[in-house]
Amino acid sequence: MWEHAKKAQPGLYTKTSLMLGLGETDEEVIQTMNDLRAVDVDVVTFGQYLRPTDNHLSVVEYVKPEKFDHFREVGEEMGFKYVASGPLVRSSYKAGEFYLEHMIKTERKQKEEAEI
């Protein structure tokens, strides 16, 4: 999906989110991050899965803040343009939205100035 989006509209920023605490291993999370970078995903967010009702999957683990920090650091080292990672982060995390807006405006301005 992300790879197709980038091919269909070059310059498009792509973002995805992962909820942690469902029994995933660190290795699985990092492999997923590698897979996302392989298709040039720009932004990733990590948050704590919280069971909304008894009809949903149970929380296996409440992930410690240090682990969220670790995944943020790994993501930045991998080259994601932005990583939001913390127990209360959600896919609509506003800091990421503000950052993306700033990044898009900055790159557009640089392109315009280069064309002059």
Image: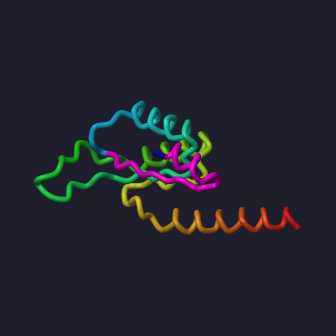
Q: Number of labelled discs? A: 0
Image quadrant assignment for residue 100: bottom right
70 and 49: which one is in front? 49
Task: Measuring from the top left, give residue 8's x and y in whole percent.
Answer: 57, 50
Residue ID at (55%, 36%): 38
Residue at image point 54% right, 44% down: 75
Q: Quadrant of residue 60?
A: top left
Examine the rendered structure and indicate whether residue 114 appears above or below residue 43.
below
Residue at point 49%, 50% (across, down) = 44
Furthest toward the left, the residue is 54
State the image coordinates of residue 96 (x, y, percent, origin top left): 52, 62
Quadrant in the picture for the C terminus: bottom right
Left or right placement of residue 53 versus residue 28 in this view: left
Rendered location of residue 112, percent (x, y): 79, 67
Give the residue drawn at x 42%, y 37%. 29
Above or below, comparing residue 89 to residue 74 in the picture: below
Q: Which residues are magenta?
A: 2-20
Residue 10 is inside the magenta segment = yes
Specify how the rendered protein is coloured: rainbow
Horizontally, is 91 left or right of 23 in the view?
Answer: right
Q: Is residue 38 magenta?
A: no
| Residue 114, image x, y percentages | 85, 62
The vertical placement of 107 against 7, above or below, is: below
